[in-house]
Image: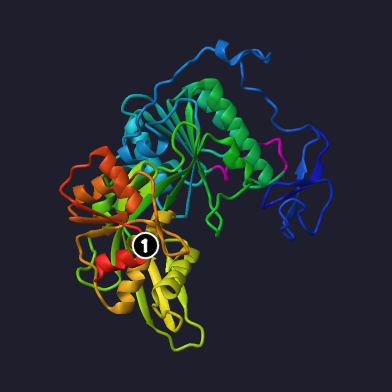
Amino acid sequence: MPEARSRYVCQSCGYEAPRWLGRCPQCGQWNSLVEELLPGRAPGGRAWIQESAAPVAITAVEARPRPRFGTGSTEMDRVLGGGVVPGSLVLIGGDPGVGKSTLLLQVSRAVSREARVLYISGEESVQQIRLRAERLGSLSDQLLVMAHTDLDDITRRIGEVVPRLAVVDSIQTVYRADLGSAPGSVSQVRECAAELLRVAKATGVAIFIVGHVTKGGEIAGPRVLEHMVDAVLYLDGDRHHAYRVLRAHKNRFGSASEMGVFEMAESGLIDVPNPSGFFLAERPQGVPGSVVTACLEGMRPLLVEVQALVSPTPFAVPRRMVAGLDAGRAVLMAAVLEKRLGLHLGNQDAYVKVAGGVKIDEPAVDLAVAVALASSFRDLPVRPDVVVTGEVGLAGEVRGIPRVAERVREAERVGFGRFILPASGLRSLERMGWQGKIQVEGVSGVGEALELVLG
């Protein structure tokens, strides 16, 4: 055995230091450097590229398009950009129990209808996988399972079976025997992911790896892990709600802002083809502070309900609580209403949330938040067939938003009768020759929008 040596690796950012430091010089975290024993020779380093390393003109490179294959789920195919690319390495993260293993077992079952799939688990026995597969209806002779954590054995089995899809659950349990550190450490996760990437590119096998998340919601391990893989997917969802949302935070083969919606049922995760109707199914009628807005998740328009509750505060400093969107954005809308429109919210508690637990990060939700706050403050309900969308500036002006036609078309499809949007968006619809049954009205300021909606 080669003589071991030690190094100190930051558990937050992966920075390596020859000696222990109280504070990481790269990310600034205190007490984050952990000693790791490594063999004398450097790990990894095996190249997967078979072509010559000599530089060539990009026009002389032969294009080799590889057809994608489906996962059996239209929602997951949408997030991946149209299906799985052979030879890709995809990382899926999410909270414990959110359904990562369930989703991948269902995908494995769908792919195994046409080709072999290898499901490798480092957390469950093959008997446990069999019981879960029976519950999900995912039994197949083409679906091969193994419970192992030794990376060398895993890569050898992938080379022997040559499946169309391989699943490794999870990357934090896999280890390389030639590394002295424990499984899940920074060096183990990084080197195991690098080896799986080499195998995927060399064999053309698509590999899905499951990643644990920290209490902050980020993938555990070195940040470089997300840079190494081809796609990073996050499966979000509240245990108290039936829906699950799959988002792409990185995708080399498609859009990095797509979203897929699933419903957790006894038989597993079920696609939700109409998420707008799903999120608005339990919307109250005639209640002040409830407004529907149209946002974009990737290429998909989505209708969600924004709720606000404004009430007198018993405290010296009013409370501001926000769930489902940026807290600073809601505070800005409250300030605009007070300064520009004279709504005295300085002695009022304000609570804003996006119903259903969905998270929205788009400026187009500004106008809906402002209308919801004003509706609750004045105790005047918004008509249930109205959709409000637009970005609001600090001067109280309503600014334009992208892809207005898709938002209006989605509202008309769901059955809404009136759409309030920025004046510039209305002009763009008129230039397009828009013809629809829904009534579209443009506004240039928040006061004008409140006058139309609340009177």
Decide which of 356, 157 is in the foreground and name it.
356
Bounds of the magenta span? 171-180
Residue 335 in view here: yes
Which colouring convention does the figure follow? rainbow
The amino acid beneath tag 1 is Gly
Residue 196: image quadrant is top right
Q: Say few, some or many: other residues with alpha carbon within 10 Å of mark 1 (under 14 / 14 to 19 / 20 or more).
A: some
Q: Residue at x 37, y 48 (%)?
A: 296
Quarter of the figure with the N terminus: top right
Q: Is residue 173 magenta?
A: yes
Q: Residue at x 59, y 36 (%)?
A: 228
Instruction: Characterize the magenta stretch by its predominant secondary structure.
Output: loop
Q: Residue at x 50, y 47 (%)?
A: 123
State the residue position of label 1: 445
Q: Residue at x 81, y 39 (%)?
A: 4
- Residue 130 location in percent, x, y? 37, 42
